[in-house]
């Protein structure tokens, strides 16, 4: 039934597009289309909020010995995960009382040791600023909304 309604709806849209621009369109919305479109919009909004509230990045560290660092912070869910070579090093969940400033220091590598420092600074209302240092040199700054 949905496929049939969708075909009718698409034919109505194509007939509307073929008309001249001066005419006022008379497109009828069926309940099922409205419901599907509404749920798709809500899903898109939820995904958009999820993207806005999370900060993700990954980098390769080292010249001879490569190590892969992944950082994922989601302010909406209050979760923080730091992984090195697909192994979780730090996991934390905070729903409320997120600190204003937080620092994570990790030494990476066996033969070629590198010190990685990630500083997370919470913005006053929403969002955070993350600074990534490798061997005490600022490498990149990530801003989350």
Image: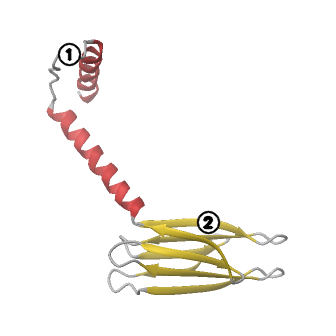
x, y percent for residue 132: 61, 76
Q: Position of residue 135 (x, y in %)?
A: 72, 82
Give coordinates of residue 91: x percent, y percent: 50, 80
From what the image shows, is residue 44 above or below residue 4? below
Indicate the quadrant containing the C terminus: top left, top right, bottom left or bottom right.
bottom left
Residue that sits furthest to the front in the current view: 22
Q: Residue at x 48, y 74 (%)?
A: 129
Residue in the picture at 56% in, 76% down: 131
Q: Quadrant of residue 53?
A: bottom left
Q: Which residue bears the numbered disc 2? A: 58
Q: Nearer the viewer, residue 143 or 76?
A: 143
Asked if the residues shown at circle 1 and circle 2 are in contact, with their CB atoms under 8 angstroms apart, the answer is: no
**Residue 93: mark:** none
Q: Is residue 98 left or right of residue 12?
A: right
- Is 108 displayed left or right of 17 in the figure? right
Question: Which one is in front, 55 or 124?
Answer: 124
Question: Label 2: how many residues lie within 10 Å, few (<14), some (14-19) or many (20+)?
Answer: few
Residue position for label 1: 22
**In the picture shown, does residue 80 fall above or below 45?**
below
**Disc 1 secondary structure class:** loop
Rate crowding at label 1 as few (under 14), some (14 to 19) or many (20 or more) other CA atoms within 10 Å: few
Instruction: Answer with mark 1 or mark 2, whichever residue precedes in sequence.
Output: 1
130 relative position to 79: left or right: right
Quarter-of-image position of residue 64:
bottom right
Colour scheme shown = secondary structure
User: What percent of the width, then of the height, locates residue 141?
Assistant: 56, 71
Q: How far apart are the two marked residues, 1 and 2, measured between alpha carbons? A: 52 Å
Residue 120 drawn above or below residue 21: below
Q: Quadrant of residue 5?
A: top left
């Amino acid at each position: 039934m949905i496929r049939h309604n969708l075909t009718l709806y698409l034919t109505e849209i194509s007939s509307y597009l073929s008309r001249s621009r001066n005419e006022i369109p008379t497109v009828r919305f069926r309940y099922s289309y409205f419901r599907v479109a509404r749920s798709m919009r809500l899903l898109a909004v939820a995904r958009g909020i999820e993207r806005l509230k999370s900060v993700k990045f990954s980098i390769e560290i080292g010249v001879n010995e490569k190590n892969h660092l992944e950082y994922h912070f989601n302010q909406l869910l209050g979760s923080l995960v730091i992984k090195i070579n697909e192994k979780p090093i730090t996991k934390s969940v905070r729903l409320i009382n997120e600190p204003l400033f937080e620092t994570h220091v990790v030494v990476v590598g066996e033969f070629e040791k590198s010190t990685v420092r990630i500083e997370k600074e919470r913005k006053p209302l929403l969002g955070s600023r993350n600074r990534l240092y490798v061997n005490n040199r600022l490498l990149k700054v990530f801003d989350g909304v």
